[in-house]
Structures are given as structure tokens and as C-alpha cells.
């Protein structure tokens, strides 16, 4: 019998209408990095929430250091040495690093806060584990990567032995990811035990000792990472083979479809412009990707391009027509389709049915209305066709309420709607965000399919792998400026990462 | 989709589709709120005068039935103001200004009744149309403020309640043809400007209720079947997505507020143009600087009716029904205000509609579907809990 620090035995957690965890067993050895792999909805987060005391399992037991325990809330979990870095950090923006770390366990001497004692401990921890932080910076002033290091120090400060990382790399740049994985290895070598939730296979191969795979709430198995391959892991996760490389034939690009010149967009947050003097063209039959780290003006640029926000300066032409001041509807008619960044905020009306959402861009066309009355028979017919063609799954077909559908199928519905509409330019903003491997493969196939059909595709992505694999041309945006134009065949992730972090840039002449 | 292949789940599928339908849950929530409100009302009656509680309570519940004409008569204006609030609410606008719109509509209707000399058959119709225009004006202005200047419609429409009330009182008092300073009320409205009575003895019930129900049904059709209704509800559910889809949000806000105002204005016209059961008289208005209560009752009606036009038809009749019953409780020594307490509690509970829904759905599920819950779990389309 091996010595496990955490044993989760036969955990079953039900939600109304679904079993999120069905009889799952997971054992964590001391000093290992244990990855938890699964698609969205596979039950990874639920399982970790059970361990962290956010949910109570209906069946099963948890043993820590061999003793059966009852974890009712995160405080209990903390007391047992379990710490968690959430996907969205739980930090007070206007507090300093130090204040955030001691929050809840403030050292007190004679009734007053004693920060110097805490400072020494933080500096010691930060040196020991290579976690570079400045204790006196405000959280709002430091980078996302450093914020994450603060979260890690928070766990170490509380002397947690079991560290849970919930998709920690989603928000980081390639360099930061590399650093983080190194830190995780270092922590494991120091004897900490790490649970690492992810659906990125490369990271598992790079850092994990063992990996437990979940699928649809059930445990598929636990494997030693060194004895397996990426392909096998993905097959375990999805239940079928997944192709990693995107099949993409050569294609000559055609006429200019979208032409952007000297576009400047004001920021809503600060006084500077969020997008500065951006110019580029997108041609028919090519996928142009705007790459960059989140928050470098992509959102503002896309809002301006699609007509959600006004621009300060510059011009935009679509299919030869000036759309600088055109309304959203006009842009749509001229030929713009838009897969929005936030599918819940912009892309869908969650309380409408699937069929009502599928006609969101077209309800006013004669196909679907007559004298102001919606032709519901046509709508149903159309929706059934799209659902079939794009494999959108839901419990009740066209009349399912979209809110009840899974994220992947919601995204499929948007893609079906935007692709089926008459268009020359497809603007896709982070179209694979939050999707699992199977759905990502599907989205990428659709994008390439559009390109092969001779449409222009403008992709905005934060995922390096996506940028490298899907696009024909890469534009890198940094602090609102295009700092480089790269050919994915002639560059690599490291170089791209340097451009994205502002460490390298073409001269202005080249960038144009 | 997989569910359908599973023979076991057929039963649960059909029940689920009923319990999950919006109509069912809204009705369930409203009924639950009504029952709890009545129970609470009974307790209040029991505490204040235990001996008469049973007879008083039976007046509240059944009293209206003996005066069915009056129930419909008093339901007419609150049905219209209820529609005015509910319709705007479908677009996510809180039209708290139904009172001002109602008062304006009433004034415009009065003006046409007194000042315009029209042939008998069209006079009352013209007066109702004028009422609609008056209300529309007072809905339009907050709508414009909201759409173009992003001023919260709650603030403007509350202010317009006061503006409408003082303006109307001033205009009426300054007009000797409409206002009689000896009675401090408006004079009797010409008979051909009054809405034809439905001829139920001892009641003022008139054609207005039939028109109001028809308007409710038309609104239902507009909301459910037209592109305008589609845009309106889309904007109400998710303003950002409606912008993204290229809908003209500003135009729709102005249009919705104008229509809502028009509905409340018609309510005001219906109220003042109602025929009187006493021959030779009519409804009169007394300008005493009080904001019309029917406007606020419209909010209650809309809430209880879940902002659904058909629901509002029934909720207005129900509220009118227990109001009539409530006035009868004075026969056994209760103050009629008791019924306002009951209505308040009902509204309070219907504001918890979602909680009520879930409680009801859970009850139905555990009772009826105990065995079938597990088969539902195969549903692949439930998101991972965060």
C-alpha cells in the first residue's frame, strides 16, 4: 500500500438532473504533480470543489494523511493544509501584495498589525521557491503572472501542503507559463503535493508525474505521464482520436476584403488610446490572426471593427465600401459575420430558444418575416437544418432554451448562425475560449473551411498554438499598436512570445 | 438528443417539458403567491378580530362574485396600466410613470369630451383616442430621455407623475367649461362621450373592459409573433446581444415607452369615460393634487401577471375581485384597508417568483419523477458547475 497524502474514494456528487462526479477515486502522492485532465463539463472543477469544501459529496470519503475527514468549507480545507489558486484570482486590487497575502491570517502584536514579521516570511518564501514578487506593489499595478505568484505565496504563507491549481495557465504568456511550470516542479521537489487542473496536454507532459482523466463525470483512469503520449491522453479524454495538426491546403489569397487604415480607438478605462494607428488588409481566402496578450487593445479594436463602438480616427473598408461610420446592421448586410468574444454577453440571448437565436442576424429578412410577422414555420425549418448541418446538440432541439445548453454547443450555434449568413469576412474573436479539445478541433475546421471557400477570416486569439496552427498571417498587437507581421511558417512560439510581450518589434516601416 | 433514444426517459421528458415551460412556472408562482397572500390576510384578520375572521375572509374570497359587474368595471383601468407597466418591462424598462400617463390620458379624454362637438357615435371613440395620445406623450418624453441621454427612465417617469398630476389639476381648474367650482369637481361628461354600458344592472361595467381585453390580446400577438416583439424581448433579455444583432435599441426604447404610455392613457380614458349607473350623471374628476393610485396598482397587476399580457388580464380581474370583496368586509366590522395588506403580501410573494418556481418545480419533481431523475442525468447539456 502506497502512502497517499490525499485519497478521494468513490466520490459521487449530483446536481439536479446530472451526476457531475460518478464514483471517482483519486489518490495524490506526497511530492508529486498530479494532473487532472478532462473536457469542459467532465467534472474536474466539481471534484476539486469537493476537496476544497465548496461542495459536499453525496457519497464517498476523503482521507488526508490516511485519516477520514469532513471538509465542510474552505476554512476546513485550509486548516488541513489544502490551498487553491482559482482561475480568477481572489485578490483585493487596491491592496498591496503583502496585504493580500496576510489577509485573513494577519500577524498581530499587542493588538496592532505587525507587517514586518510577515514581510520577512514573504521574502524568505519568495526566495526559496523562486517566486519573484514585490511585497509593496499594489495588485492593480502588477502583471497577471505576478498576481498568480502572489496567489501561490498566499498558499505557502498558510503552510499549505496540498496545492490545487485550477487552469492556471489560461491567462499567461508563453514565457510566464514556462516560469510557472518550473515553479510547480520546484514546489513538488520541496515536498508539496500539487493537483493541476488543465486541458492542455503539453503542460501535462511537461510537468506532471501522473494524470487522472475524467470524462462525463466518470474516471477514465490514472496513468503515469512518462509511459503515455499526448495522443493517448487526448483519446482518453475525448473518447476518440483527435487530430492535432490542422489540415490546411495551400491557397492563393484573392482580393482585399477588409482594409483598415490608421484606426485609432479611445480607451474606456484610461486616457490614452487603446488602439493606435492600426493599418492592415485582409484578403479573400486567408486567415489573418491578431495575436497578443489579453488587454492590448484587441477588444477595443474588434468593437470598432464590428460597429459596437465608434472610432476616433482612421477609415475601414469592407468589400470596397466605406464602413467607417456604418451601423452594425449595414456592416452585416455588406458582408461581415462576427463570432463575438463574449458569447453570453453579445453572442446569444440566453433566455431565447435555440431557433430564436439562430435567426438573430436574419429575423428581419424576407425569408423569416412577412409584414412584420415572423414566419415561425420557416424559422423552425431553418433551425432544424442548421442544427443538423452543424451538429448543435441540445436536449429539445430548436425549442431548447440556450441557457441550458453546454458552452461548446452554444458556440456551435453562434458559428452556425454566422457562417450560414451571407458573408465575405468572418471576424472570430477567441472562438475557442473555454472549449474542450473536441470542440476546438471543430471550430478550427470551420475557420479553415471558410478560408477554403474563399472568404476572408480575421481571427483574434490569445492561444499561441491556435495562432500558429490556424493562421496564414499573424499580426501582433502590443499596447494598441501592431508591432509585427509574421508568417507562421517562418516563426516559432518563442519569437511570437517576444513580440507579444513587447520585448521585440519590427521597425514601424516593416510593420506597415 | 440522447434522451429520446432512452425508453425510460419518455415520461420524464414530457413532464419536464410542462414543468419547465414558462407559462406553467409563471402561473404556478402566481397561484402560490396568491395562496400565501390570502393565508397571511386571514391571519391578520384573525388577529385583529377573531370572531368575524371566517365570515370576513369569505367576503374577501367570494364577495366579488356577487358583484361581478363591478369586478370587471374596476378591473378595466388597472388592466390598462398593468399592460403599460408589463409591456415596458418586457424590454427591461421600468415604467413607474403609468400614473402620470394615466392622468394625462384622462385629461385629453376629458378635453375632447367637453370641448369638441362630435356626432354621438364617434365622440367617445375620439375621446379614447385622445386619451391614448395624451398618455403616449408622457411615455414618449421619458423614452427620449432614456434613449438619447441615457437618463434612467425610473427617475424621469416618477417626475412626470408629478408634472402630469399638477399640470392636469391646473388645466382643469382653469377651464370653466370642464370644471365646476361649486362642486370642486369636473362637470358631468356629455352622454355621447361616455362609453356604452354593457347593461348589467347596478354596475358601471362598460365596453371598456372588452376593449381592454382585446388590447391585451393584441399585445400578446405583437410580442409573440412580430419582429418588433422579437426585438423588444431580445433587448429586454440582453441589451448587448440586441446591439450586436444590429437592432435599433434607441428607436425601440422610444417606441416602447410611447406605446406603454398610450396604454396607460387609454386606461385613464376608460376610467373617466365610464357611464354612470345613475341616470344623468357621469364620472367626475376632483383635482386635489393626488397621484392616481391606478397607475401604481398597474405595477402590482403587472408583477402578478408576470408582465405577460394574458397573465395581466387575469391578474387585473383577480385584484379587482378581492378589492371588491375587501370593501364588503366592512359589513362585519373590518376596515377595507385590510385588503390592501393582502394585496401587498401577494405582490411581495410574487416578487419572489423565482424562488417560488424552484420550490414548486422541486416539489413536482420529487413527487412525480423520483424514479426518473437518474435517467435525466445522461443529459449532456448541463454545464460544469463552477
Image (cartoon, coloured by chain):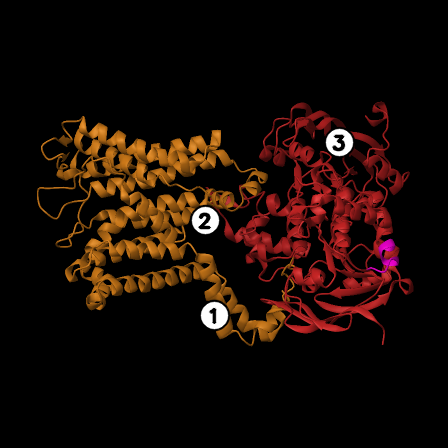
Chain colours: A red, B orange
Secondary structure, magenta segment, majority class: helix
Give the percent coordinates (x, y) of residue A86: 71, 53
Q: Residue at x 17, y 58 (%)?
A: B330
Residues B288 and B198: in front is B288
Q: Residue at x 23, y 38 (%)?
A: B125
Residue carrying label 3: A479
Q: Residue at x 48, y 32 (%)?
A: B150
Which numbered disc flags the more N-terminal residue, 1 or 2? 2
Is-magenta flag for residue A493? no
Residue carrying label 2: B225
Residue B364 circle label: 1
Left or right: where A94 falls relative to B165: right
Q: Quadrant of the N terminus of chain A?
A: bottom right
Residues A106 and A350: in front is A106
Between the residue at mark 2 and the residue at mark 3, the CA separation in whole angstroms equals 47 Å
Q: Residue at x 68, y 61 (%)?
A: A49
- Give neighbour class at mark 2: few <14, some 14-19, many 20+ (Cα, 10 Å): some
Give the percent coordinates (x, y) of residue A71: 67, 66
Give the percent coordinates (x, y) of residue B2: 64, 67
Query: Quick one: SS at disc 1?
Result: helix
- Give neighbour class at mark 3: few <14, some 14-19, many 20+ (Cα, 10 Å): some
Q: Quadrant of the C terminus of chain A?
A: top right
Chain of residue at mark 2: B
Eyeballing the image, is B25 above or below A169?
below
Amino acid at each position: 500500500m502506497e502512502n497517499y497524502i490525499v485519497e478521494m474514494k468513490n466520490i459521487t456528487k449530483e446536481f439536479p438532473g446530472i451526476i457531475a462526479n460518478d464514483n471517482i477515486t483519486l489518490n495524490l502522492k506526497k511530492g508529486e504533480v498530479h494532473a487532472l485532465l478532462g473536457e469542459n463539463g467532465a467534472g474536474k472543477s466539481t471534484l476539486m470543489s469537493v476537496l476544497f469544501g465548496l461542495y459536499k459529496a453525496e457519497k464517498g470519503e476523503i482521507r488526508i494523511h490516511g485519516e477520514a475527514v469532513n471538509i465542510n468549507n474552505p476554512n476546513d480545507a485550509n486548516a488541513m493544509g489544502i490551498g487553491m489558486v482559482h482561475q480568477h484570482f481572489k485578490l483585493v486590487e487596491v491592496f498591496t501584495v503583502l496585504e493580500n497575502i496576510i489577509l485573513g491570517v494577519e500577524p498581530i502584536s499587542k493588538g496592532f498589525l505587525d507587517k514586518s514579521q510577515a514581510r520577512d516570511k514573504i521574502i524568505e518564501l519568495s526566495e526559496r521557491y523562486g517566486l519573484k514578487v514585490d511585497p509593496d506593489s499594489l495588485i492593480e499595478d502588477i502583471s497577471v503572472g505576478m498576481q498568480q505568484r502572489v496567489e501561490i505565496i498566499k498558499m505557502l504563507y498558510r503552510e499549505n501542503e496540498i496545492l490545487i491549481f485550477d487552469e492556471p495557465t489560461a491567462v499567461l504568456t508563453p514565457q510566464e507559463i514556462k516560469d510557472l511550470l518550473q515553479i510547480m516542479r520546484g514546489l513538488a521537489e520541496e515536498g508539496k503535493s500539487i493537483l493541476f487542473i488543465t486541458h492542455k496536454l503539453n503542460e501535462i507532459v511537461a510537468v506532471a508525474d501522473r494524470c487522472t482523466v475524467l470524462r462525463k463525470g466518470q474516471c477514465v483512469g490514472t496513468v503515469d505521464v512518462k509511459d503515455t503520449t499526448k495522443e493517448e491522453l487526448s483519446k482518453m479524454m475525448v473518447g476518440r482520436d483527435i487530430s492535432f495538426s490542422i489540415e490546411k491546403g495551400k491557397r492563393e489569397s484573392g482580393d482585399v476584403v477588409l482594409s483598415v487604415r490608421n484606426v485609432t480607438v479611445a480607451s474606456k478605462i484610461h486616457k490614452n488610446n487603446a488602439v493606435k494607428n492600426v493599418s492592415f488588409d485582409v484578403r479573400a481566402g486567408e486567415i489573418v490572426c491578431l495575436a497578443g496578450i489579453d488587454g492590448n487593445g484587441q477588444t477595443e479594436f474588434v468593437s470598432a471593427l464590428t460597429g459596437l463602438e465608434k472610432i476616433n480616427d482612421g477609415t475601414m473598408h469592407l468589400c470596397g465600401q466605406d464602413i467607417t461610420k456604418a451601423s452594425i446592421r449595414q456592416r452585416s448586410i455588406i458582408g461581415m459575420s462576427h463570432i463575438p468574444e463574449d458569447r453570453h454577453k453579445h453572442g446569444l440571448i440566453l433566455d431565447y430558444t435555440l431557433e430564436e437565436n439562430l435567426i438573430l442576424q436574419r429575423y428581419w429578412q424576407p425569408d423569416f418575416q412577412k409584414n412584420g410577422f415572423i414566419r415561425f414555420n420557416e424559422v423552425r425549418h431553418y433551425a432544424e437544418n442548421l442544427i443538423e448541418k452543424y451538429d448543435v446538440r441540445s436536449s429539445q432541439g430548436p425549442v431548447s432554451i440556450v441557457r441550458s445548453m453546454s458552452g461548446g454547443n452554444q458556440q456551435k450555434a453562434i458559428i452556425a448562425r454566422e457562417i450560414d449568413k451571407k458573408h465575405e469576412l468572418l471576424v472570430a474573436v477567441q472562438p475557442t475560449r473555454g472549449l474542450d479539445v473536441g470542440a476546438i478541433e471543430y471550430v478550427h475546421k470551420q475557420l479553415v473551411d471558410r478560408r477554403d471557400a474563399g472568404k476572408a477570416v480575421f481571427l483574434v486569439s490569445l492561444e499561441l498554438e491556435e495562432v500558429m496552427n490556424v493562421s496564414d498571417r499573424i499580426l501582433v498587437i502590443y499596447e494598441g499598436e501592431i508591432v509585427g507581421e509574421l508568417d507562421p511558417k517562418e516563426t516559432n512560439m518563442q519569437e511570437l512570445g517576444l513580440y507579444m510581450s513587447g520585448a521585440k518589434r519590427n521597425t514601424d516601416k516593416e510593420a506597415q | 438528443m440522447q434522451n429520446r433514444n432512452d425508453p425510460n426517459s419518455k415520461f420524464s421528458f414530457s413532464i419536464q417539458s410542462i414543468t419547465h415551460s414558462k407559462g406553467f412556472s409563471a402561473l404556478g408562482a402566481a397561484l402560490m403567491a396568491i395562496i400565501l397572500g390570502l393565508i397571511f390576510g386571514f391571519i391578520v384578520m384573525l388577529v385583529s378580530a377573531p370572531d368575524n375572521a371566517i365570515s370576513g375572509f369569505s367576503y374577501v374570497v367570494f364577495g366579488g362574485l356577487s358583484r361581478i359587474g363591478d369586478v370587471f368595471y374596476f378591473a378595466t383601468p388597472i388592466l390598462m396600466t398593468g399592460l403599460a407597466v408589463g409591456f415596458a418591462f418586457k424590454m427591461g424598462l421600468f415604467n413607474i410613470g403609468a400614473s402620470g400617463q394615466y392622468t394625462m390620458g384622462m385629461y385629453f379624454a376629458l378635453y375632447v369630451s367637453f370641448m369638441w362637438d362630435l356626432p354621438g357615435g364617434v365622440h367617445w371613440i375620439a375621446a379614447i383616442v385622445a386619451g391614448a395620445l395624451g398618455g403616449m406623450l408622457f411615455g414618449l418624453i421619458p423614452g427620449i430621455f432614456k434613449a438619447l441621454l441615457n437618463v434612467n427612465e425610473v427617475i424621469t417617469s416618477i417626475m412626470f407623475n408629478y408634472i402630469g398630476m399638477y399640470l392636469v389639476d391646473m388645466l382643469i381648474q382653469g377651464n370653466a367649461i370642464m370644471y365646476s367650482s361649486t362642486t370642486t369637481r369636473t362637470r358631468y361628461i356629455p352622454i355621447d362621450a361616455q362609453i356604452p354600458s354593457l347593461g348589467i344592472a347596478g354596475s358601471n361595467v362598460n365596453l371598456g373592459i372588452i376593449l381592454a381585453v382585446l388590447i391585451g390580446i393584441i399585445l400578446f400577438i405583437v410580442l409573440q409573433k412580430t419582429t418588433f416583439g422579437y426585438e423588444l424581448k431580445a433587448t429586454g433579455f440582453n441589451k448587448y446581444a440586441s446591439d450586436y444583432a444590429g437592432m435599433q435599441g434607441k428607436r425601440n426604447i422610444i417606441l416602447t415607452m410611447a406605446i406603454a404610455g398610450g396604454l396607460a392613457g387609454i386606461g385613464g380614458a376608460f376610467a373617466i369615460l365610464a357611464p354612470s349607473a345613475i341616470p344623468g350623471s357621469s364620472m367626475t374628476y376632483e383635482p386635489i393634487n393626488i397621484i392616481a393610485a391606478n397607475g401604481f396598482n398597474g405595477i402590482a397587476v403587472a408583477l402578478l401577471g408576470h408582465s405577460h399580457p394574458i397573465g395581466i388580464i387575469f391578474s387585473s380581474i383577480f385584484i379587482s375581485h378581492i378589492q371588491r370583496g375587501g370593501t364588503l368586509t366592512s359589513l362585519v366590522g373590518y376596515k377595507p384597508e385590510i385588503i390592501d395588506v393582502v394585496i401587498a403580501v401577494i405582490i411581495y410573494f410574487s416578487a419572489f417568483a423565482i424562488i417560488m418556481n424552484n420550490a414548486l418545480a422541486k416539489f413536482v419533481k420529487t413527487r412525480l419523477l423520483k424514479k426518473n431523475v437518474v435517467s435525466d442525468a445522461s443529459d449532456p447539456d448541463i454545464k460544469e458547475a463552477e
